[in-house]
């Protein structure tokens, strides 16, 4: 069993302890086993200015300094047991119900959960379904269609993210039971999230050469959006090495109705060190964002019940071990993983009158409930719970109110016995008939997501040049 005491990265004192004892607000040497290497210690006085290796931000929003040395887990800590409390064979039972069937001969699940705010949606190769009350209402999806969520439902058609031959994608907004054409979607990739009431925030990677890519923020319903931190150019205009924004390639977007937002991505531009996860975040009042480098080489699952309670799963920059990173609204805390197996899923369960808050942890072979992970002075060990009998390859985990939802190779399971199973198959690869016809554009600049020139209308055919052609660098209008 790994020591669960955290690596606290605070503006006052940076306390690093994975094998030894430590108290938040003080510095204590890690008492690692004989022959093990203790972690370095640092105080705020020794930290460089903001923008260094993982800073924190005070309540007032000013950037606090970060440690000069990378935080490292105890170099020779004993490997964690895969059974913190009992073994999966002794796991506590859960009442699972199969509500969406899938092809169970596949090695991976053909069904994935779609980010859908406080509700739930799932998609497959041939359709998607949204939970309405106790019913799953399904609808087919045509090839190269992506379902998105914000203040309302959105649909991207003819969309191939990060493709050199992107086709002619378009964005549609759900109104009642119909899809209304919104605009042409001239972007390599698109992330959306419900933001303040009635507004959908979108992160786009514009059509241009890369890497580096950079990104833009747009409110799909119209209106002002925050501006990402710009990076100085690292090459002449049109050069593939040009920097656009400091965060190089966005991977995840979190937005909250109170106004806070987080953009996570890989790499910083211009590059100043090995690629790692970075975050750009805005507070309630907007203003200038805070840019931070996180001690993660890879970003996995995220559980974000509130802007002051974020949980990130990823691999540590020092040795690629699976770790957890927690944000409490002021700073980040690095926690050694409570399990030896790499985590594949996270889900947050709020406290009730009957039980304390908990973080659910999913691995490729087991499910665990970790009670009171934010409790100061130590946390309890995770407790194993049984996976569904037909689920051999779990891949995603979601918590909706106080019920669990699990994606497996054989389908979608839930602990809510009132949900009516879906009769249709969402993993049917049979193409859905294309049913949407976009209106003819009024002009080349009729969309906020369109470039100023039309050179990329058909980048892989006709007179247009492909994205790897040198010397092509259009300007973009947002």
Image: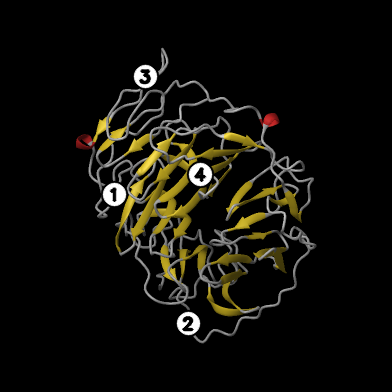
Asked whether the residues under the numbered discs 1 and 2 touch, taking CB atoms below 8 Å apart as contact, a structural biologist would say: no
Q: In the rendered structure, find residue 102 and report the number of the disc placed on it.
A: none
Dividing the image into 4 quarters, which one contains the C terminus? Answer: bottom left
Kindly report the distance in space between the C-alpha atoms of the residues bearing marks 2 and 4: 52 Å
* Quarter holding residue 67: top left
Q: Secondary structure at mark 2?
A: loop
Kindly report the distance in space between the C-alpha atoms of the residues bearing marks 1 and 2: 40 Å
| Crowd band around label 2 with a 10 angstrom C-alpha radius: few (<14), some (14–19), many (20+) | few
Q: From the viewer's perspective, is the residue at label 1 or at label 2 nearer?
A: 1
Asked whether the residues under the numbered discs 4 and 1 touch, taking CB atoms below 8 Å apart as contact, a structural biologist would say: no
Q: From the viewer's perspective, is the residue at label 4 or at label 3 nearer?
A: 4
Q: Secondary structure at mark 1?
A: loop
List the single residue furthest toward the front.
Answer: 353
Sooner in the amino-acid sequence: mark 3 or mark 2: 3
Asked whether, in this view, residue 138 is left or right of residue 290, the answer is right
Q: Which residue is mark 3?
A: 31
Kindly report the distance in space between the C-alpha atoms of the residues bearing marks 4 and 1: 28 Å
Q: In the rendered structure, find residue 446 and report the number of the disc placed on it.
A: 2
User: Up-down: is 386 above or below 465?
Assistant: above
Q: Nearer the viewer, residue 160 or 392?
A: 392
Q: In the rendered structure, find residue 356 and report the number of the disc placed on it.
A: 4
Q: Secondary structure at mark 4?
A: loop
Sooner in the amino-acid sequence: mark 3 or mark 1: 3
Kindly report the distance in space between the C-alpha atoms of the residues bearing marks 3 and 2: 64 Å
User: Up-down: is 448 above or below 62?
Assistant: below
Asked whether, in this view, residue 419 is left or right of residue 166, the answer is right
Kindly report the distance in space between the C-alpha atoms of the residues bearing marks 3 and 1: 29 Å
Rendering colour mode: secondary structure
Query: Residue visible at 29% across and 43% down?
Result: 52
Sooner in the amino-acid sequence: mark 1 or mark 2: 1
Q: Secondary structure at mark 3?
A: loop
Sooner in the amino-acid sequence: mark 4 or mark 1: 1
């Amino acid at each position: 069993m790994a020591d669960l005491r955290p690596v606290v990265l605070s503006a006052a004192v940076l306390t690093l302890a994975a094998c030894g004892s430590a108290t938040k607000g003080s510095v204590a040497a890690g008492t690692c086993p004989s022959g093990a290497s203790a972690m370095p210690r640092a105080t705020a006085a020794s930290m460089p200015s903001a923008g260094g290796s993982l800073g924190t931000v005070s309540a007032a929003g000013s950037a606090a300094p970060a440690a000069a040395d990378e935080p490292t887990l105890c170099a020779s800590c004993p490997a964690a047991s895969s059974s913190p409390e009992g073994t999966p064979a002794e796991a506590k039972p859960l009442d699972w119900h199969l509500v969406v069937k899938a092809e169970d001969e596949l090695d991976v699940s053909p069904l994935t959960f779609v980010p859908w705010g406080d509700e739930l949606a799932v998609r497959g190769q041939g359709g998607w379904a949204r939970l309405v009350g106790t019913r799953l209402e399904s609808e087919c999806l045509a090839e190269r269609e992506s379902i998105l969520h914000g203040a309302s439902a959105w649909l991207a058609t003819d969309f191939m993210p990060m493709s050199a031959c992107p086709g002619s994608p378009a964005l549609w907004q759900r109104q009642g039971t119909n899809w209304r054409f919104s605009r042409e979607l001239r972007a390599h990739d698109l992330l959306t999230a419900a933001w303040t009431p009635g507004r959908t925030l979108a992160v786009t990677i514009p059509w241009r050469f890369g890497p580096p890519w950079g990104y833009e923020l747009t409110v799909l319903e119209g209106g002002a959006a925050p501006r990402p931190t710009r990076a100085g150019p690292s090459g002449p205009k049109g050069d593939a090495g040009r920097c656009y924004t400091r965060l190089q390639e966005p991977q995840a977007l979190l937005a909250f109705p109170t106004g806070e937002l987080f953009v996570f991505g890989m790499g910083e531009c211009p590059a100043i060190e090995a690629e790692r996860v970075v975050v750009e975040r805005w507070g309630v009042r907007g203003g200038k964002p805070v840019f931070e480098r996180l001690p993660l080489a890879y970003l996995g699952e995220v559980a974000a019940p509130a802007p002051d309670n974020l949980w990130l799963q990823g691999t540590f920059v020092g040795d690629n071990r699976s770790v957890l990173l927690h944000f409490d609204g002021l700073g980040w805390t690095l926690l050694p993983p409570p399990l030896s197996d790499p985590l594949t899923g996270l889900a947050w369960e709020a406290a009730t009158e009957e039980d304390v808050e908990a973080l659910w942890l999913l691995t490729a072979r087991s499910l665990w409930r970790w009670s009171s992970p934010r409790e100061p002075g130590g946390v309890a060990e995770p407790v194993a719970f049984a996976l569904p009998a037909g689920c051999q390859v779990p891949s995603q985990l979601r918590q909706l109110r106080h019920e669990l939802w699990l994606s497996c190779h054989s389908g979608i399971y839930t602990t809510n016995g009132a949900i009516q199973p879906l009769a249709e198959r969402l993993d049917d690869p049979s193409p859905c008939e294309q049913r949407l016809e976009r209106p003819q554009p009024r002009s080349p600049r009729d969309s906020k997501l369109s470039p100023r020139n039309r050179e990329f209308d058909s980048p892989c055919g006709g007179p247009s040049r492909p994205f790897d052609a040198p010397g092509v660098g259009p300007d973009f209008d947002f």
